[in-house]
Image: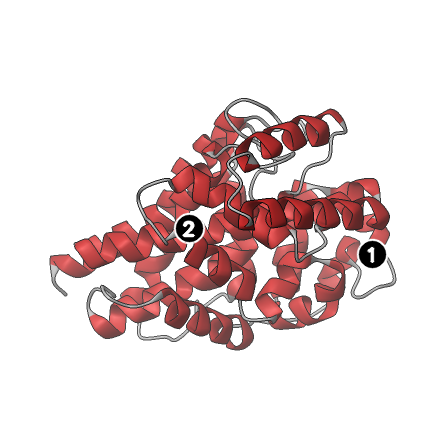
Amino acid sequence: MCSSIDDAIEIAAASLASGLAIEASSYPKPGNVSPIGDAKNLTHWFFIATSASMAIELEKLIRDIVYSNAPCPKEGIGEKIYKLYTTSSMLQGGRNTHLGYTILVTPIAVAMGLLIRELGSAGGVEAEEILNLSYDVARSCGSPEDFRWISKAILEASPTYVLKYIGVGPDIYNADRTRATFWDFVETFRRHDLLLNEIWDGYQRAYLSYKIICEDYPWKLYEKISIAFISIGSSAVDTVIAREKGYKVALDVMNIFRKASTIISSDSKLWLKYLEILDRELRESRINPGSIADIVAVGTGLCVMEKALSSK
């Protein structure tokens, strides 16, 4: 295979990983991590370090798919999620900056491997096609061991909230007793997790965020990410907020984001100032829309990847 394929692999991996760092570097995103403020004991540099590690691991994953003849990872999606999550945590001490992002981006990385193998570079492939194939990967590339691997990642990342889901589906604490694929996991828990529901729905919100972010790319990138953050947050109850503060608080935040979205749509020049005030208020209340951030980070990575592959 020619070097252009290797270039495409590296560009795709770096671009997808960059979505995490670029989203975390954007401001204002009310309540979320940024260079001027922490959230949920997570600080900005954690995400930069994670993104650097993730680029290396995503490159390995995409390369394995490109240079194999199989339509799916041999070990299934779950093992890839666990390895990508744990290895990418090392530079910042194992903190959970990216489990949700990892679950979202792993099927996308597999899809990119398939596209690069088929087309030779994947330049010119649109985000909608990538996400459609990612949805197919999520449905079809399962292994009976997926649930065990994903449960290990969840317990290493944030085991406290798992107690809330006892009795909802398979027992994450005793995952060795359960044989379930990645799609089984998505189907079982999607009503309780915005990111799993995002995969179930075919990455619709990620695609919307991509369209907003890529509208004037690369100009006003941080501003467009802020707009995408509010747009997605105005139409979805954030899982992180619901787990930590309760469903009512999460619903209240969604309604606040709807007001912010209305201000943005009115072309008022005060919308940035309003988001800055809202950011201080949510941060003081320790309210972090982390699930919304993961979706917007995926949209950001897709935009960077599409533009980089097209210009190669």
SS class of the residue under badge 1?
Answer: helix
Left or right placement of residue 187 versus residue 123 in this view: right
Residue drawn at (74%, 30%), measured in percent from left and top?
286
The residue nearer to you, when weighing 195 against 9, is 195
Which-is-in-front pick, marks 1 and 2? 2
- Left or right for 269, reference 232: left
304 and 67: which is toward the camera? 304
* Residue drawn at x 68%, y 57% as measured from the top left: 236
Figure quadrant of residue 69: bottom left
Give the farthest residue toward the right. Answer: 167
Q: Is residue 202 visible in this depiction of the protein?
A: yes
Question: Label 1 sits on what residue type?
Answer: Tyr
Kind of residue indicated by mark 2: Ile
Furthest-top residue in this view:
36
Pick the front one: 231 or 73: 231
User: Quadrant where the N terminus lies?
Assistant: bottom left
Please tell me which residue is depicted at 27% across the width and 66% down the height of the picture.
Answer: 116
Question: Tag 2's secondary structure?
Answer: helix
- Neighbour tally class for label 2: few under 14, some 14-19, many 20 plus, Cα within 10 Å: many
**For mark 1, does the 10 Å Cα neighbourhood hold few (<14), some (14 to 19), or many (20 or more) residues?**
few
Q: For residue 146, which numbered disc appears in the image? A: none
Q: Quadrant of the C terminus?
A: bottom left
Q: Which disc number belongs to residue 165?
A: 1
The answer to whether 25 is drawn above or below residue 160 in the figure is above
Residue at mark 2: 213
Looking at marks 1 and 2 on the same chain, the residue that comes earlier in the sequence is marked by 1
User: x%, y% of residue 255?
Assistant: 74, 49
Number of numbered discs on residues: 2
Residue 36 spot, x, y in % from top left:
54, 22
Q: Position of residue 156 (x, y in %)?
A: 66, 42
